Image: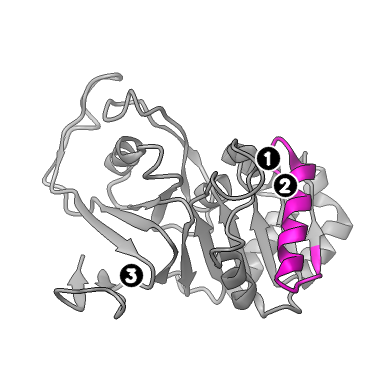
Amino acid sequence: MSVKGILIPIGGNEDKGNGENERYTLEYITEGILSRILKESGGKQATVIVIPTASSIPVEVSRNYREAFDKLGCERVHIMDIRSREDAETPEYLELMRKADCVMFSGGDQSKIVKYIGGTALDDIIKDRYHNERFVIAGTSAGAMCMGEEMITGGGVQEAFTKGATGMGKGMGYIHNFIIDSHFIRRGRFGRLAEAVARFPKLIGIGLAEDTGLVIKNGNECEVIGSGMVILFDPRRLIHNNQAVVKEGSPMSITNLKIHILANGDELNIKKRKVVFSPMHLKLTDVETL
């Protein structure tokens, strides 16, 4: 289904900001991703809402985002520190969301976003505006992972490629084509995304590297932004997939899992199943059919 809004999932970057731990990190100021979000939202006069629900340190995260957007010349930044479903029904919050140009979800625990916001009046407004207006939904790390209908909730690297190693749950449902994972390369999350798409072979797996994101327009046209890579897992033509028959904890086997590695400026058209490579890259072909 075509939508008028813009979705911008971002892969996270613990090397940016003011601390070593990802909880204390603010991403994408100097690399331009926040700037791109602001541009898609209408520029410096845009009204931006930051929701730090996923974070365990919402005050610090909120302050850092205020400072970051201020550096970009945007002063209309509002914080919605939602810690319960009752908070998500606050009339002032609902009215503000109806007038905003962009909402951005912070990193942390993606399950908290679904728990406290999914299915609320605030969620209904976000989805309605995303489908019917040029409204931007952005999210970093956990804020990106929650965007799909199906959502990865956890899973360690050591148990990768064994059935049950990847926790799954229902996401916010802003986009139905993708399962999104973040910090993908640095944290070695190849295995857990592979299990996720083996479990849901009609969906495309999106592995976002740190300092990297996608700008998704019309629910279909995707552009890679940032300094890293986006790894696409396309399981739609699997020849063999034993995920459904092996026991929990057992190794899985799948064949004909198609993988694409995309970088800044590369584009993906979901409906046409085509990848278009950026002119800035040394290329063998201009178009690759998925």
Q: Are marks 2 and 1 in contact (CB under 8 Å)?
A: yes
Judge whether residue 58 is colored magenta. Answer: yes
Magenta extent:
52-77
**Label 3 neighbourhood size at 10 Å, few (<14), some (14-19), many (20+)?**
many
Q: Secondary structure beneath disc 3? A: strand
Q: Position of residue 207 (x, y in %)?
A: 38, 50
**Label 1 neighbourhood size at 10 Å, few (<14), some (14-19), many (20+)?**
many
Q: Residue at x 88, y 59 (%)?
A: 92
Q: Earlier in the sequence, mark 2 or mark 3?
A: 2
Q: Residue furthest right?
A: 92
- Tell whether 63 sits left or right of 12: right
Front residue (pair 11, 179):
11
* Circle number at residue 61: 2
- Tell whether 46 sits left or right of 91: left
* Circle number at residue 55: 1
Q: Secondary structure beneath disc 1? A: loop
Q: Residue at x 60, y 35 (%)?
A: 21
Q: In which quadrant is the N terminus drawn?
A: bottom left
Visible residue check, residue 279:
yes
Query: Residue beneath label 3, please?
Result: 268
Q: Earlier in the sequence, mark 3 or mark 1?
A: 1
Q: How is the image coloured?
A: one colour
